[in-house]
Amino acid sequence: MHRFSRVLSLLAVTLPLGACAVSPQECDPRNADAGFATKFGCNTQGGYAQRIEQKEKILLDERKTNQLFRDTYAALDKERSEVGRELDRQRSDYAALNKAMSALLAELKQKTRGNQRLQGEIAALEKDMAGINRQDNNAAVAQKQYELQKLRTRLAGLEGDLGLR
């Protein structure tokens, strides 16, 4: 009995001392190698609670970063669709202009059949119009759409590098 009380008092003295030396980094609940004193210290000193708070802060920070990525992706997608709509609108406007110009020139050709000078001017207008038709008038809009897609791809790579994907 005397021996038991001696062991118990020795344990009572050393256990709190061992528990005092525990840091929050040592308080990993998955650590199967942690001794009783470490676990006891983590529990009584609030090491587990501090670890949970640290992990929650990291999680909240990662969620905030993830939300910023999602907001950026949404803004890029919106801009890309707006650029696409603008490109479609410009193509439609250009086709309407082209049709109206062709109809006007055809009408003028009929009305000025005998006049060589006016026929020459109409031919010059048709030549200029053909040159304009060969040009890519939508290059700026298409280039912007391409650049937006490149930016989106780079962001996706960054998101993957950050481990958020």
Image (cartoon, helix red, strand yellow):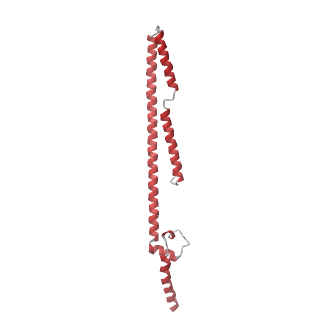
Foreground of the two, 156 or 5: 156
Foreground of the two, 147 or 10: 147
Question: Residue 76: percent from the left, percent from the top?
Answer: 46, 43
Q: Is residue 77 above or below residue 55?
A: above
Kindly give the residue lying farthest to the top in the view shown.
Answer: 114
Q: Residue at x 44, y 29 (%)?
A: 92
Kindly give the residue lying farthest to the right in the view shown.
Answer: 33
Foreground of the two, 30 or 61: 61
Q: Residue at x 47, y 76 (%)?
A: 20
Q: Is residue 76 above or below residue 103?
A: below
Residue 38 visible in rendering = yes
Residue 1 visible in rendering = no
Q: Residue at x 50, y 68 (%)?
A: 25
Q: Is residue 65 above or below residue 130?
A: below
Q: Residue at x 44, y 55 (%)?
A: 64
Question: Residue 61: percent from the left, percent from the top?
Answer: 45, 57
Q: How many marks?
A: 0
Q: Is residue 4 above or below residue 68?
A: below
Question: Residue 137: percent from the left, percent from the top?
Answer: 49, 29
